[in-house]
Image (tube, rainbow, N blue to C red):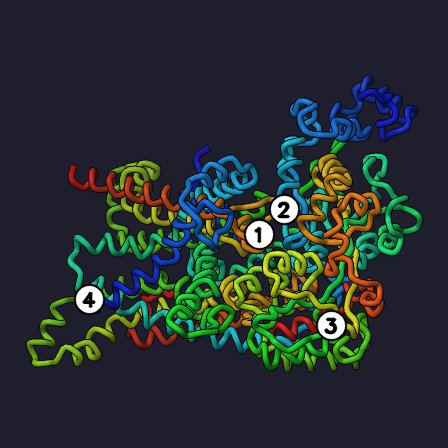
Amino acid sequence: MRALVTAVYLFLYAPIALVVLFSFNAGRSAVQFTGFSADWYGKALSNVLLMDALKNSLLIAATSAILAVVFGTMAAMGLERLGARMRALFDGLLAAAIVVPGVVIGIATLVALVQLFDVLNPLLAGLWPGQEAPKLQLGYGSIIAAHGLFTMALVTMIVKARIASLGRDIVEASSDLYASPLTTFREIVLPQILPAVLAGFLLAFTFSFDDFIIAFFVAGSKTTLPIYIFASIRRGVTPEINAVATMVLGASLLMILIARFLMREKTTR
Amino acid sequence: MSKDYKDNLPITPRAFMEEFMRLKRGSVTRRHFLGVTGLGVATGVMSGFPGTFSKSAYAADLGTRMSIATWPNYHDPATFENFTAATGVAVDVNVFGSNEEMLAKLQAGASGWSLFVPTNYTISTYHKLDLIEELDLSKLPNFSSATENPRFTKEGQIGGKTYAVPKNWGTTGFSVNTSKIKTKLTSWKDFFEIIQTEADGRGMVHDYQLTTIGSALVSLGLDFNSIKPEDLAKAEELLIKVKPHLFAINSDYQPSMRSTDAWITMCWTNDGDQMNRDMPEIAYVLGKDGGEIWTDYYAIPKDAPNKAAGYALLNFLMDPKVAVKEHIANGAPTTDSRVMSLLPPEVTADKIVYPDEAALTPLEFGAAVTLTDPGRAELMARFKSA
Amino acid sequence: MPLKPQTRHKLVTALLLGPAGLWLFFFLVLPFIAILVFSVGKRGPVGGYAPAFTFEQFANLGTRAAAFVNTLELAPVGAFSCLLVAYPVAYYLAVKVNPQRRLLLLSLVVAPFWTSLLMRTYAWMYLLGGRGIPHLLELVGIENVRLINTPGAVLLGIVYGYLPLMIMPIYVSLEKLDRKLLEASYDLGAKPIGTFFRVTLPLSLPGVMTGFALVTILLLGEYLIPQLLGGGKVFFIGNALVDLFLQSRNWPFGSAIAVTLVAVVVVILTIAMRLTWRIAGTRKVDLV
């Protein structure tokens, strides 16, 4: 059993080890190791297009995850207050947002937005007082919206489950003591649901950061990191891409370590 | 810089003055002024080689980045690095596998490209759909229509206006690893036979209706450009029969051929030449029963976000000194006699790049109708999903 | 002006749910209506969409039957293979490992998610390609082995990509398992194998079902793995959709397929839900 589990871990990490190894390749190829060098890290950091893609991905992931967490948590709390029928409708929509395949979300958003922009842009141009009216087009907004749809639903589900396990007594007790709803939320509810909210944020961020297929459809002229990597795979990957992937991995491992360290601090105190 | 400035101005003096007055009145921005008059480009062109002008002098006019859509293994990476060094504009290279894909992306809007590389037979459709703009040749002083071979360049012009200028021409044949496949192959008929027998599981076809369906048609003795349902049905039968024997359906076949995962593939001139150069056992064959001859063009999308940089890069690529380096690196034959005269003799004598006229005779240019014909599109989809 | 408590309650509810509701409306409901409308339209003369009201797109679904069959076959097969690999790992982590090391090992299962799936799949392209494992096999005398661009390669990619998603829910359900039950079973003279099949496995079934349903549903929309590891020959519905929108530009037909795919997902989910309820004996299990 132990051997089997070890084999699975090897299976999980072999490709990652390969990615990291080739990031230190001296040659131009990401498939033939010719010597050890860290040059590609410098090249990756000075490649403006790659750095643009990375920045876009970070910006989009952070924005969509923050919006998803705020709106998702609000929705999870609001759901409690709804009547049965409305609640079923809302639950159904949230479930749909999760199970509809990403490729369909991407396509449907593309179709809807292209049609919508075709109607709105001439209107906007007609009404705009200045010379050049702004033109609505696919870009940051559409990616954030499409990613946020899935991740918001995810956050709502996670937080809802946590609230359900909380029990209403404690909240009611708090309001009985004439605490304002806001105080009740800040002092009682938030600390309780915080782990779920944080988990939701991490999931949302990771999903958005790694998503290719939705962004592939709705990105317009914006390039995210996965889109850049996909294009590189098609035209021949250089170790530059491996270097970025390795840096991202390193940064996230560091974050996990810091998070665990902070959590340990808290529990020991 | 001894020449009179007028020689390099890509706009008439009168129009120039009008724009200048508008600028003074404040109704246009400086950026617009430089863009319209082509001054931003002209300064870049006049400098001739990098470094004579300070980067910042025109970086402001060309922006800092642009994006081009092109084909796999089709440029010398150094070309874009040199362009970036000269202008400060970083070039994002998007690679596509088919003209359909390019068209789809452009049709969906906001492709973000400032320059792209469509093939001859697609240009009329782009024009009809109003997706490309008429090129302002005054912004392309390096382009010389007099030295272009009209056999390859006529489809860039529509109604006397120039919408696209030629990049290079080429052929679609197949590359075969002769150390793995011993049978001598000379036709598309041979190609489709061998991938079901000696090269079982090792053959590749393009993920591209024009050449995959076209070559299948040719192997059956039918017209490369046919859209007749009965012809297409026969091609479909052949392709579906062949599919279980294929290694892959992919227009980017170089990696698989080089790693010898694949032994035979449909192939464009430039790829055939690049692979043959590094691995002489990979031969390039033109079907004696037919196949495609093509010209790729440069065009600028109507909604290009950075037209100034698009023109600047295009003009840079049209410079014979740059084009000849591109040619030597990517192995695609030129349409421009200025480039031809700069080429070393071993390139012009290369029979992969410049085949004998007799080998070209059976080949055909792609026809516009194949790009949008639903029958061919559906056939391709059924072939892939079978 | 003080509000009536009831109005106030409604107002707060609306404020809490408003943003999420608007988001769902604009980016889920509207897009879905758009593809519904498109799915009864016609392909324009040069591609794209032309308004119409016809069911011909749905009548044409048969032309993509192969893609549907492929997907409906490979999704459960992939999920099942994933389950076979995931279960021992989840079991080991939940039952055999001591709690201190458990967290570390669990984090190690999730950590691969932090590198791009594309990069990891690309690494597999290399490992399965001619310079990878087949090259090693050649060194020991086994020649001309082909691994990349086969259904096997796609299956491997699927198991690799979805393994953590399968391990997690099974682990959670096994972790809740009451050890006293196991001990009771042993005390009553049951053999370990018997205990596993009579006690452990049934109790972990909700987790298994959740993982299985999750992976199957995600696989129904998979595009990348078949594309990169299947050489364009292993065709999922996701690949058919991408081609229809980005190659042949037949938006109405693509929309019809997308609508059908959503319907398939809903049906599968409903069946899975019912099954889980029956097995778990309670309705308190959420698959999603």
Position of the C terminus of chain C, as image quadrant, is bottom left
Say which chain tag 1 marks.
Answer: A
Q: Is label 3 or label 4 in front? A: 3
Say which chain tag 2 marks.
Answer: B
Alpha carbons under labels 4 and 2: distance apart: 54 Å
Alpha carbons under labels 1 and 2: distance apart: 8 Å
Q: Do discs 1 and 4 belong to a common subunit? A: no
Q: Amino acid at mark 4?
A: Leu
Q: Amino acid at mark 3?
A: Ser
Badge 3 vs badge 4, beta-carbon distance below 8 Å: no
Label placed on residue C177: 4
* A142 with respect to B300 (left or right): left
* A232 with respect to B131 (left or right): left
Q: Is label 4 or label 2 in front? A: 2
Say which chain tag 3 marks.
Answer: B
Secondary structure of the residue carrying numbered label 2: strand
Badge 3 vs badge 2, beta-carbon distance below 8 Å: no
Residue C145 place in picture, x, y as percent: 46, 73
Q: Do discs 3 and 1 belong to a common subunit? A: no
Seen in the picture, residue C17 relative to C195 is either above or below; the reply is above
Label placed on residue B145: none
Query: Which sits earlier in the primary sequence, circle 3 or circle 2?
Result: 2
Q: Which residue is mark 3?
A: B215
Badge 1 vs badge 2, beta-carbon distance below 8 Å: yes
Q: Is label 1 or label 4 in front? A: 1
* C274 with respect to C255 (left or right): left
Label placed on residue B93: 2
Q: Which residue is mark 1?
A: A231
Q: Amino acid at mark 2?
A: Val
